[in-house]
Amino acid sequence: MRFRGLRLIVIGLLFLLIDINMSGFDAVPDPLGYGLIVAGLISLAGLRKAFAAAELVAMIALVISVFDMVLGFPVDGADAPPAQTCVFCAPVPVDGSELSVFSGFLSIVRGVSNVALVWLLGQGLAGLLAVRGLAREARATTACVSVNIVILVLGTVPFILILAAVPEFAFPAGVTGLAAGIWFALRLNRVHRVLNAFDAASLEAMAWSPDEGALPDGR
């Protein structure tokens, strides 16, 4: 399966969406999710330049999540107020300490990394679909990515502070963020199936074998 890396990315995203805290310990640590995403992108990096760039971005997010888990920096939203809007978002502490400033910086870097990661994944997938003439699937993927990027951007510190002031908006905002993340994971899974089915049918129709070459990816 040429696109098995997409399956790893889907599993990694689901791990990021799952937040099970047991006595303050995250039963599904974020580094595991980011690690799977990096592994998936490594296998896809040769197909599109966007995937290679996304691999680097995912590594940055992985390093930040390791800081969070090992050193306890509050950059993953674990200590966020009820206004937390999505799994990727993180509050910036404002107590003025050096740790607060550093963890706030990491929060911003992680937020930017997640936006870039989603956008690059979307670019790569849309490109793979478009070059195969699957324009409808490409448009659906672009729409899904666009919605998720909007939610990620809205899930920044200013919006979190607004929600903190109006706590009744916290629950619907959180549900919206979770739903968008699940939609993104399901969209990736569908693209995985569509691409594999399309390439298998094309190879069979053209009497190609895997050893004779692969379909062009339009880089």
Image (spheres, helix red, strand yellow):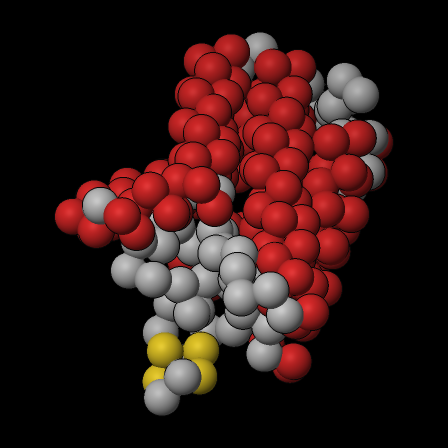
Q: Residue at x 16, y 48 (%)?
A: 168
Q: Residue at x 63, y 25 (%)?
A: 123
Q: Residue furthest bottom?
A: 23
Viewer-side residue, 131 vs 139: 139
Q: Residue at x 49, y 35 (%)?
A: 153
Q: Residue furthest front?
A: 96
Where residue 115 appears, as percent x and y from the top left, is: 58, 38
Q: Quadrant of residue 30?
A: bottom right
* 209 sits left or right of 179 in the view: right
* 73 sits left or right of 140 in the view: right
- Looking at the image, is 74 positioned above or below residue 9? below
Residue 4 appearing in the image: no
Where residue 149 appears, as percent x and y from the top left, is: 49, 32
Residue 92 appearing in the image: yes
Where residue 83 appears, as percent x and y from the top left, is: 31, 53
Viewer-side residue, 188 vs 172: 172
- Looking at the image, is 26 positioned above or below residue 58? below
Q: Quadrant of the C terminus?
A: top right
